Image (cartoon, coloured by chain):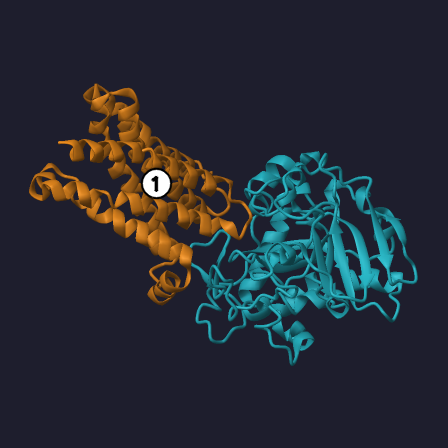
Chain colours: A orange, B cyan
Amino acid sequence: MATRLKPVVWGLCLSPLATLAGRGYLGRLTANPIEYLTHQTGFWALVLLCATLAITPLRRLTGWSWLVRLRRLLGLFAFGYAALHFTIWLAIDRGFAWDDILADLVKRPFITAGFAALLLLLPLAITSTRGWVRRLGRHWLWLHRLIYLAAPAAALHFFWKRSSKLDVFEPVLFAALIALLLAARIPGWLHHRAAATRS
Amino acid sequence: MPPYDDIPAAEITPESLYLDRRRFLRLGAAGALGALLPAAAAGCEQPRRNAADPDAQERPDRPTSYEDITSYNNFYEFGLDKGDPARNARTLRPRPWSVAIEGLVAKPGVYGLEDILRGVTMEDRIYRLRCVEAWSMVIPWRGFPLADLVRRVEPLPGAKFVEFQTLYDPEQMPGQRSRTLDWPYVEGLRLDEARHPLTLLATGLYGRDLPNQNGAPLRLVVPWKYGFKSIKSIVRIRFVERQPVSSWERANPGEYGFYSNVNPDVDHPRWSQKNERRIGELRRRDTLMFNGYGDQVAQLYRGMDLRRYF
C-alpha cells in the first residue's frame, strides 16, 4: 500500500513548490515576492511537520502499519521546505549580511526559535538513510524524538513572528495541532510502560 | 481647479508621465523637477543624499508601480493579508462622504467632502512611504496640505493635538467584524506636525482618485513617520488638548509609540529598523532618519529623546 501511495505523497509534497514556481513564472508572487516565498515555504514546512507527527497516532488509530513507510518522505520534505525557507531568508532577504543575521539570531526570539527548529531537524535529515538507521540502532529512535522539540519550536517561531500583528489564528492552529499530536502519543507510552513493568 | 470628481479622464496625467519623472530623479536635476512639482515637494524629491551611503547615486527613488501600490496594503478593516484590501474593499462607498471636525476649533461641524476640497489647491507630491514592517514604496500622491484645512477651521489656543478616526461601519468594512484592533482606527499628530507643510491630506495617487484599498476618499500622508500613522478613510478630525492614544499604541504600547517617526537607530522589539525592502527591489536599502525628510522635520523634535518618544 505504501509503495503505491508513495508517488501520490511525492506529488502532494511537491505541489506547493510547483505552485510557487508557476506563480513566479506568471509574475504572481505579490508585490513583495521575497516575503511571499518566505511565508509560503515556512507554512508548508509546518504543515509537513504536522503530517510527519500524525503518522504514529494515525497508525494506532487505524491499525494501518504501512503508514510508517511514508514517514521518512514526509519528514524529509518538511526539512526541505524549512531549509528553503531559511535559505531564502539568509541569501535573498538578508543577502548574506552576516552582521545583521547574527544580530537577528541573538536579539530576535522568533528568529532564534526558527533557527533552533531547523538545527534540530538537521541531524534527523542526515540520519534518515537506511545506513544510519542500522548504524544507530536503538539510539536512532531516541535521536529522532528531537522532532518533539523541533515542531513546537517551529510553531513558536510562527507565533512570535505574528503575535505583534494580532493575527495569530494560523500560528495558534498549528500550535494546537502539534500539541494534540504530541499528546496523542501519551496513551501509547503509558501502555508500553505498563506492559514493560508487567513482563 | 474644478471639483475633483469632474476632471475628465483625458486631463488626468497618465502613469507613463509620472514614470518619466524618474529620469529627472536619476539625473538629480532638481531644477527640472522643480518645474514639475510645487516648491514644497521639490525639496524631498532629490535622490538620496545620505553621503554615507555609497549606493546613493546608483539607487535613486523611483515611483513604485501603480499595480504594487494598489495590491499590497495594510488596511485591517478589509482583512489582515496584504492582498485582502484590494480584494475586499469594493464594499466601501467613498461617495458621498463627510468629515466631522470637532473639539477645540472655532468652526466645528460636519463638512461634506466637496466642501473640504472646495478652495484647496491640489498638488502632486512623490513621497517615500516606510512601513513599520521594514518595507517601503515611493508613491505619487495627489492631495493638499493638512495645514490648509487646519487654518480654515481655526483651532482654539487650547488645541495641542489632532486626533483622526477612520470610518466605523462593519457593513462597508467587513474586517471590523473581528476584533483585531479596537475599532474605529484612531491616529494622532501634534498640532505642529499637523501644520507641517509636508503633511498631506491625500485624495488620489498617480493622478487618479484613491482606490478604496488605499484609503478612499481622504487619507493622511505623513512621510517621515511609519505608514500606519497615515490613517485612511478619515471621517473625524478632532482638535484636543491631550495627546490621543492611537490604535496601535493601545494594542501594543511596547511596540508602537505615539510618534512613530522613521528611525533606523530605534529597533522594533521584533526586528531591526536599520534597513528596508523597497517594493520592486531585491537588495535591501538603508533606512534613513525621518525617512530622509530630516532636513524638513528634525527641528520638530529638537531636544527630545527619540528612544523614549519612539
Towards the viewer: B115 or B26: B115
Towards the viewer: B27 or A184: A184
Identity of the amino acid at label 1? Ala
B160 above or below B168? below
Residue at the bottom extreme? B303
x, y percentage for residue A8? 28, 23
Would residue B180 be seen by someone viewing this image from the given angle? Answer: yes
x, y percentage for residue B303? 65, 81
Query: What chain is tagged by disc 1?
Result: A
Residue visible at 35% across and 50% down in the picture: A88
x, y percentage for residue B50? 52, 73
Residue visible at 46% across and 51% down in the picture: A161
Pointer 1: residues within 10 angstroms few (<14), some, or many (20+)?
many
A6 above or below B100? above
Towards the viewer: B82 or B123: B82
- Left or right, A140 with respect to B268, comes to left
- Left or right, B238 with respect to B70, comes to right
Towards the viewer: B1 or A190: A190
Q: Report the quarter where the N terminus of chain A lies.
A: top left
- Left or right, A134 with respect to B20, comes to left
Residue visible at 49% across and 76% down in the picture: B51
Would residue A91 be seen by someone viewing this image from the given angle? Answer: no
Residue at the front extreme? A198
B212 above or below B22? above
Residue visible at 67% across and 77% down in the picture: B299
The residue where tag 1 is placed is A45
